Image: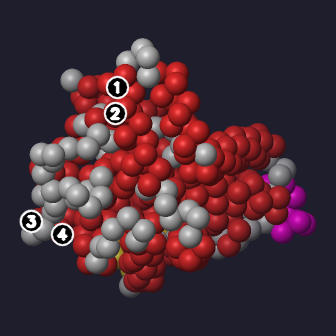
């Protein structure tokens, strides 16, 4: 029943963001045209590739800017359709594959102080775990990787979860800082959109700076933390207190990579490459839709999605993904009439979804990762999942 309620809540969140996105972007028109192929171009409606090229506005264009037929009606006709150059699937597919490898590799230095794991095992666990993070609601997919890698006597679920927390805190810190910095170099004439993005960057940066501080304090002052918990709760519920302390100590052990300069440098360096490749991928893929998005705007789009994912997600991030992805484009005057931008956002979401399904679904189909085990990780509550188990089915 608890799991069902989580899914229902996440679906409601998805419906809400689809509604929000539909208010600002022409979602209902994307599928209103017949599709045809013209060479390497997938064409929807009565348009040509030359009609949909978008360039950022120059200062002489004013606040609205030049859209060359995509958004601003007084600068030319609004195209009755959209176009995508299918050849851009090749470089973007390569970039997504490199992103996957980097995402797998950056987990290794966090796990190395706890246990030795081969790249190929990390790869299959990572592929399934990344797919589940995207597909499962309310961040339930975050429990899949630690659940699969946990091995009795070598690594506990709580230890593995500690590494995931480090990942998420650094990801949030880097991307919110990136959004905060990049916004300084993007147009601010569209006051409402700029204010919303700026406020989001402030909130996210504050949350993740605090999270970083708490992680550091938890590790540096672990003895005092344990003593405080035992003093406050020990007399009221001694059995539960000792159980909680056991979880906390295992969790802190999962943070053991933090004081190691080598492991931390490898993790931070790989993470920087990972996010750098993510933003560059958006920059490349947007050109397939004729949108010459500035590189800084592409990183703002990426960071906006990550910050937006602080809100509990819907299944497959439906609605919220493209709502937050498109938000920075409003700074350039791209808005409600832009079929091309809307199609680009849906295309990015779809290609990422297909890549995750292919990479993760393969290991489920061939049986090297058990679907039953993956599903079991979502049925446990966060508290239950962190408790040491003697009977958990392993990968």
Q: Residue at x 68, y 64 (%)?
A: 297
The label nearer to you, 4 versus 1, is 1
Q: Which residue is mark 3?
A: 367
The magenta stretch spans residue 247: no
The label nearer to you, 4 versus 3, is 3
Residue 375 can be seen, yes or no: yes
Q: Residue at x 55, y 43 (%)?
A: 223
Question: Residues at badges 1 and 2 in contact (C-beta under 8 Å)?
Answer: yes
- Which residues lie in the magenta part? 58-66
Q: Which residue is mark 2?
A: 243
**Residue extending furthest toward the top:** 236
Where is residue 209 shown, x and y percent of the image? 68, 48
Distance, label 4 to label 3, CA atoms, is 8 Å
Lower sequence index among marks 4 and 1:
1
Q: Which residue is mark 1?
A: 240
Lower sequence index among marks 4 and 3:
4
Q: Is residue 179 above or below residue 201?
A: below
The label nearer to you, 4 versus 2, is 2
Q: Residues within 10 Å of mark 3 (few under 14, many from 20)?
A: few
Distance, label 1 to label 3, CA atoms, is 38 Å
Q: Residues within 10 Å of mark 4 (few under 14, many from 20)?
A: some
Lower sequence index among marks 4 and 2:
2
Q: Residue at x 42, y 14 (%)?
A: 236
Q: Residue at x 37, y 22 (%)?
A: 238
On-image quarter of the C terminus: bottom left
Distance, label 1 to label 2, CA atoms, is 5 Å
């Amino acid at each position: 029943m608890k799991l069902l309620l989580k899914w229902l809540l996440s679906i409601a969140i998805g419906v809400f963001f689809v509604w929000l996105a539909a208010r600002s972007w022409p979602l209902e028109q994307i599928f209103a045209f017949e599709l045809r192929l013209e060479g390497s171009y997938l064409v929807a409606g009565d348009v040509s590739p030359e009609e949909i090229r978008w360039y950022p506005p120059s200062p002489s264009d004013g606040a609205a800017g030049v859209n060359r037929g995509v958004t601003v009606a007084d600068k030319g006709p609004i195209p009755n359709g959209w176009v995508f150059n299918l050849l851009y699937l090749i470089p973007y597919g390569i970039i997504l594959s490199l992103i996957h490898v980097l995402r797998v590799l950056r987990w290794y230095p966090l796990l190395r102080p706890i246990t030795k794991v081969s790249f190929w095992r990390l790869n299959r666990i990572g592929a399934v775990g990344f797919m589940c993070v995207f597909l499962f609601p309310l961040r339930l997919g975050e429990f899949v990787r630690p659940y699969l890698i946990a091995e009795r006597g070598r690594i506990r679920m709580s230890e593995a979860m500690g590494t995931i927390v480090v990942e998420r805190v650094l990801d949030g810190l880097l991307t919110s800082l990136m959004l905060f910095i990049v916004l300084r170099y993007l147009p601010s004439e569209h006051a409402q959109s700029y204010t919303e993005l700026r406020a989001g960057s402030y909130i996210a940066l504050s949350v993740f700076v605090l999270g970083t501080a708490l992680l550091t304090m938890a590790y540096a002052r672990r003895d005092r933390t344990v003593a405080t918990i035992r003093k406050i709760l020990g007399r009221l519920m001694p059995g539960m207190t000792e159980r909680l302390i056991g979880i906390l100590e295992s969790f802190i052990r999962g943070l053991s990579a933090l004081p190691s300069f080598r492991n931390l440098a490898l993790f931070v360096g790989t993470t920087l490459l990972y996010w750098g490749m993510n933003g560059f991928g958006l920059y490349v893929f947007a050109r397939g839709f004729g949108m010459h998005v500035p590189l800084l705007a592409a990183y703002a789009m990426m960071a906006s999605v990550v910050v937006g994912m602080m809100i509990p997600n819907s299944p497959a991030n439906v609605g919220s993904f493209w709502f937050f992805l498109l938000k920075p484009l409003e700074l350039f005057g791209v808005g409600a009439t832009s079929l091309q931008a809307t199609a680009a956002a849906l295309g990015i979401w779809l290609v990422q979804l297909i890549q995750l399904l292919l990479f993760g679904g393969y290991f489920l189909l061939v049986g090297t990762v058990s679907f039953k085990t993956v599903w079991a990780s979502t049925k446990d509550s966060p508290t239950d999942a962190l408790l040491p188990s003697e009977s958990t089915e392993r990968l």
